[in-house]
Image (cartoon, rainbow, N blue to C red):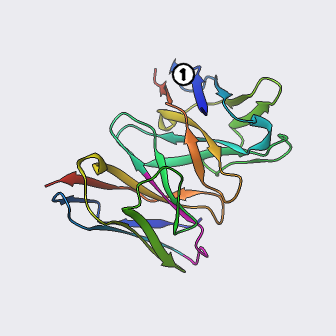
């Protein structure tokens, strides 16, 4: 199985700050990566797919990048509504998710 | 508007069975692969099963293979998950999810249904 390692496990950011979350795959996943946001008590929401494509309706302050085994999600200007848990997911071989990053406002 | 509504959850004893359902609306159900993803309390996400558009192909991780069966009824726009030989570690919120037309990613999720396996 492909293991997905996310970092950090948690972080806090000020309003307007740029936030970066990392995800490392145990083998090359050829950009087959998605990012999801989950707010408390809600189901996950797709933000990014194919490592860097923005899902319809997602604010442009979210962006994804990376290749091979290393990927990142960037929020260019932290907003209150961006609080939540972020998961990465690989879709190359079956499906596995990262353990999540909890993002809070500082 | 795309909607996925799960039902069928509840409290069940270890070793027993339970069947979840997901009613889909707002899109052409038969055109999409569908899946179940679960989340144990305060834990991360775990993929449980995927089914092809016609239902002829199904995929499972080792953790549920042989115990869980995913199926669909395209005429009813419904997805199902039959869970047998349930274990305490199957306790989780189960989400029905639609897979994007391209790539193995989930663009719509249901609200989730809780399954508790306990004696």
Residue B84 position, x and y percent, is 66, 29
The structure residue drawn at horizontal position 65% and vertical position 42%, both measured from the top left corner, is B35
Residue A50 relative to residue B78: left or right: left
Horizontal side of residue B101 vs A83, given as left or right: right
Residue at image position (58%, 47%) is B107
Query: Depth check: A5 or A43 in front?
Result: A43
The answer to if A85 sits in the magenta stretch is no
Image quarter of the C terminus of chain A: bottom left
Q: Nearer the viewer, residue B31 or B115?
A: B31
On what subunit does the disc labeled 1 rest? B
Query: Circle 1 sits on which residue?
Result: B9
Furthest residue to the left?
A: A106
Residue pictured at 51% horizontal, 66% vertical? A3
Rendered view: B15 above or below A54? above
Please provide percent x and percent y for residue B80: 70, 29
Q: Is residue B49 left or right of A70 when viewed as pictured?
A: right
| Residue interval drawn in magenta | A27-36
Question: Is B33 or B115 nearer to us in this picture?
Answer: B33
């Amino acid at each position: 199985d492909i293991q997905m390692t996310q970092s950090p496990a948690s972080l806090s950011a000020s309003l307007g700050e740029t936030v970066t979350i990392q995800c490392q795959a145990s083998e090359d996943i050829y950009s087959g990566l998605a990012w999801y946001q989950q707010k408390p008590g809600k189901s996950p929401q797709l933000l990014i797919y194919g490592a860097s494509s923005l899902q319809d309706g997602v604010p442009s302050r979210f962006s994804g990048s990376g290749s091979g085994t290393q990927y990142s999600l960037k929020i260019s200007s932290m907003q209150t509504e961006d609080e939540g848990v972020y998961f990465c997911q690989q879709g190359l071989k079956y499906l596995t998710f990262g353990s999540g990053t909890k993002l809070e406002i500082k | 508007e795309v909607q996925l509504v799960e039902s069928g959850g509840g409290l069940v004893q270890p070793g027993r069975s339970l069947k979840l359902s997901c009613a889909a609306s707002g899109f052409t159900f038969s055109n999409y692969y569908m899946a179940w993803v679960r989340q144990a309390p305060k834990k991360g996400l775990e993929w449980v099963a995927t089914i092809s558009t016609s239902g002829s192909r199904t995929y499972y991780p080792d953790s549920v293979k042989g115990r869980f069966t995913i199926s669909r009824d395209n005429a009813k726009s419904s997805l199902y998950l039959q869970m047998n030989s349930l274990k305490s570690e199957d306790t989780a919120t189960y989400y029905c999810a639609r897979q994007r037309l391209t790539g193995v990613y989930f663009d719509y999720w249901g609200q989730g249904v809780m399954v508790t396996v306990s004696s």
